Amino acid sequence: MSWLPCGLYHEHYREDHAWWQTTFVKGKMLLLAIFAIVILPYLDLVAPDLGPYLLNIAVILLYTILAASGVQLLIGYCGQVTLGHAAYVAIGAYTCCLVLMHGPALAAMTNDPNPIVRTLAALFSLLMKAGLLYPAGIILAGLAAGLWCVIFGLPSAKVKGFYLIMTTIAGQWITVEFFITQYVSQIGGRQQAFTVLPEHFTIGPFTIDSDRKIYYLGLALVGLVVAVTANLLRSKPGRAWIAIRDNDIAAEAMGVNIVAYKLLAFFVAGAMGGLAGVYWLNFNYIISPEHFQWFWSLWWVGVILIGGVGSIQGTIFGSMFMVLVMEGLKALIVPLSGAFPELLDKFLFIKEALFGLAIALFLIYEPNGLAYRWWQLKNYFNLWPFSY
Amino acid sequence: MDTEEKEDISREAPVQLEVDSISISFGGVQAIYNVSFQVRKGEIFSIIGPNGAGKTVTLNCISGIYKPDRGRIIFEGQDITKWPPYKRAEAGIARTFQKIELFSGMTVLDNIRLGRHVHLKSGLLSSSIYLGKTAREEVESRKFIEEEIIDLLEIEHIRNKVVGMLPYGLQKRVELARALALNPKLLLLDEPMAGLNLEEVEDMARFILDVNEEERWKVTCILVEHDMGVVMDISDRVTVLNFGQKIAEGRPSEVQQNPEVIRAYLGDVEDLYATRR
Ligand SMILES: Nc1ncnc2c1ncn2[C@@H]1O[C@H](COP(=O)(O)OP(=O)(O)OP(=O)(O)O)[C@@H](O)[C@H]1O
Ligand SMILES: [Mg+2]
């Protein structure tokens, strides 16, 4: 193993299949991990104001990465444009929320006349005793969101491009504005928003109730999603997705079952959205249909357009860009609002206008996204000073 | 090449593919009408004919991209007429395209890897964790690609290049590599020589003969080609299509002298030998 990539030779195929191939890159990743795991969450010990503020931004960033990962998988890798991903995030959030809210009641129904309910009750009380109700909620949320996404991916078997975009938009309205607002939110007969107390978010002995723990959970979920994506992309399903994106006729002629692999992509992308929904619930303790409006579906597409379509780093860079720019905007507007109070009223408007502008500028000047620029920069320094 | 041996194949080997009076029309255009032929195991079977004769449409019917309006296609005893293309690939039919259809954003290696798709067993879970089974399978598949295909087709130097950037001749070769990665029993080649220079044509002909003759491969080939020199040289048998109908079939020497074939090529005998578009 060498330090510099210009003289990189592998002796085994396995090394050439590895994520990080040089000691240098492995070192870089280690430093990044130390920063993310040790330094950032404990920054408040030395900087009591800045630390929590940064941690909060990091949580929003992790949520954005989680939500955009599914969009990246569908659009960037499988070529299936989705403009309704907030629907699957919502399904994930509501599934987990319902499990946490009604799980204990269900667990108590051990004397129900219906044997199915009794079995479920026994199962849930077991889960509760083991402190695994929340993990079960997370898994169910992923499954439910994945299957939900498959339903709206079904038309992709027959239609492409514009028509598929229309179905995913329809999915958004049907799910959030109709199904969740009209029916799911009415469960329990209370008002629109559901709240879950922090103490319900327990994984075994841990309760995910402090900023730091929420941050760690997000880090774990993002780590999982990124690792799964990276692994899928270097094996059979991921290659099939990319093949479908690049040339579906050739892919099918080479033995790829197009419909099955498209639906698999919808499932995985939906499940990732579901995890994002769970995370949203965990750091807000409250959900309502307004949290999953169509704007967010567009926002996550914007994230991958800016970060780079068809690149995992692209998802991360795009999320960073969007989150940081929004924070910067807030930081700019709040002090200015003393002099111009109307700025605060117009914040939403400014945000959306700026979002549109950013996407337009990126499409014109940086169509390959930030990830490509980063790659260029890296190549330049890798071979520096003989980089021509 | 030993012509004696080749003639034996076309008489004695079992029938691998039977195309039984297929017809297909697009709108008003009758692209092929009542075409039948049998391809025997181990043959190089060529389909020739003027532009628009229906050669590509015939291959598309065999690989499943088009479904014939009438007629049947039987592969190794199974009626595959209604099968979708991916199932035919799983059964061992691979192809290349007249207009190159590579995954242009992927590297050469990844294009060829996709050709292994039907042989890989990893599902969603195992691929997600990429431990044990999947990692092992990927290494095995890589080994197969490196040792059997990249070596054979002499493309070591471009394995990590993005396909879209490669010159045309190499792209044609990568397409062949991807089809071979499927380890096919039957290989459909749609004008593999078109647009190649003389040296590349010779290489390509050599590769086709290699995979056809070598013990390791023994792939049956259906070749659609305008380069009559190559067709007459390497084919065991030739079928001639004209305006969607079969007008002749036989060994290269027979077909060459068939008056109807000569008429189809505008009476220009030269054409039979020198067509190069
Ligand atoms: N998808 C399609 N829709 C309409 N017409 C088609 C289609 N595919 C083929 N055809 C028509 O069928 C006829 C046969 O076409 P085909 O591509 O098989 O010719 P070919 O023998 O391969 O010719 P070439 O040597 O030019 O490749 C042509 O008239 C063509 O226009
Ligand atoms: Mg053709």
Image: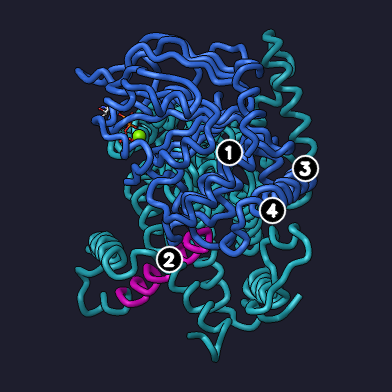
Chain colours: A cyan, B blue
Q: Tell me the element at label 4.
A: helix
* Quarter of the image where ligand 1 sits: top left
Identity of the residue drawn at 45% across and 60% down? B166
For disc 1, the chain is: A
Label placed on residue A142: 1
Which region of the structure is painted magenta? A309-333
- x and y percentages locating residue A277 in the rendered image: 51, 45
Give the label, 1 or 4, closer to the camera. Answer: 4
The verdict on a common chain for dots 1 and 4 is: no
Identity of the residue drawn at 62% across and 39% down? B1
- In space, the residues marked 3 and 2 are separated at their CA atoms by 39 Å
- In space, the residues marked 1 and 2 are separated at their CA atoms by 24 Å
Q: Tell me the element at label 1.
A: helix
Residue kind at label 3, given as amino acid type: Lys
The answer to whether the residues at label 3 and label 2 have Cβ atoms under 8 Å apart is no
The verdict on a common chain for dots 1 and 3 is: no
For disc 2, the chain is: A
Q: Which is more N-terminal, label 2 or label 1?
A: 1
Q: Which residue is mark 3?
A: B133
Q: Tell me the element at label 3.
A: helix
Q: Which residue is mark 2?
A: A323
Give the label, 2 or 4, closer to the camera. Answer: 4
Q: Which residue is mark 4?
A: B146
